[in-house]
């Protein structure tokens, strides 16, 4: 099964050539201001993509997904993952949009116990974890050399041990690395100047 992964498109989704695959995954920040019109535009584009399955995890810019009354308007062919999961052809996916921080961004949670409650929801048999935030110390370094990933998520990953952890949020950290049996992929397609410089990730995985 071929997974195509993107994140941090910030309204520039129309500019990004999307490869063919079975599952298209967006790991957050599909919009920039999180407005109704931005969200509608993205969802219409995302739902039209030819991939059989489409998974969406919102990011800290995607304010409209925090509105319960809007969630009923998600196109039926998109799996919206907000602290929940879906099984596709034997592969168990789990997604969460929360990011550590105290500012007024969408889905922000305080570091420590508050955000840990979200990570403790992740089932231990998760095969592929999709979050917006990276774990601390893994593809989470901004250009000034500061790591902004989540310490609590890093601890939970040692227990859950998915085969893949897909995320975005830190544009400067785009890329992939294998550590302790987990393939970590930062799916950011825009750089820190919001220019589309990175290609979508292509991930081949096996069904059970």
Image: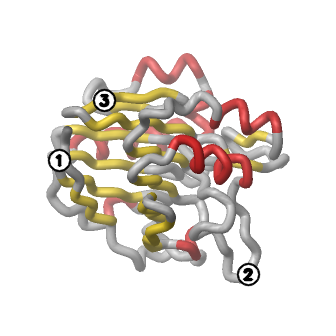
Residue name at image x 45 percent, y 36 percent: 94
Labelled pair 3, 2 in contact (Cβ < 8 Å): no
Residue denoted by label 2: 145
Dividing the image into 4 quarters, which one contains the C terminus? top left
Residue 96 percent across, percent down from the top left: 55, 38
Residue 53 percent across, percent down from the top left: 23, 38
Residue denoted by label 1: 22
- How far is the residue under mark 3 from the one under mark 2? 37 Å
Residue 44 percent across, percent down from the top left: 31, 40
Count of labels shown? 3
- Is residue 140 shown left or right of residue 165? right
Labelled pair 1, 3 in contact (Cβ < 8 Å): no
> Which is in the foreground here, disc 1 or disc 3?
3
Q: Disc 3 on helix, strand or loop?
A: strand
Residue 34 seen anywhere in this rendered image of the structure: no
Badge 1 or badge 2: first in the primary sequence = 1
Residue denoted by label 3: 87
- How far is the residue under mark 1 from the one under mark 3? 14 Å
């Amino acid at each position: 099964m071929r997974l195509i992964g993107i994140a941090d498109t910030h309204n520039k989704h129309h500019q990004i050539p999307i490869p063919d695959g079975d599952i298209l995954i967006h790991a957050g920040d599909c919009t920039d201001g999180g407005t109704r019109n931005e969200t509608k535009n993205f969802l219409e584009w995302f739902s039209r993509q030819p991939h059989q399955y489409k998974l969406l995890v919102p990011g800290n810019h995607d304010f409209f997904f925090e509105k319960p009354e809007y969630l009923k308007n998600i196109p039926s062919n998109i799996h919206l993952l907000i602290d929940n999961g879906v099984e596709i052809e034997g592969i168990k996916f789990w997604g969460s949009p929360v990011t550590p921080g105290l500012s007024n961004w969408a889905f922000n949670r305080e570091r420590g116990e508050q955000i840990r409650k979200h990570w403790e929801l992740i089932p231990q048999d998760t095969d592929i974890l999709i979050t917006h935030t990276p774990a601390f110390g893994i593809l989470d370094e901004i250009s000034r050399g500061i790591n902004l990933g989540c310490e609590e998520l890093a601890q939970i990953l040692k227990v859950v041990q998915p085969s893949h952890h897909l995320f975005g949020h830190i544009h400067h950290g785009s890329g992939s690395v294998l550590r302790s049996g987990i393939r970590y992929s930062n799916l950011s397609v825009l750089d820190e100047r919001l220019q589309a410089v990175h290609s979508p990730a292509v991930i081949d995985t096996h069904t059970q």
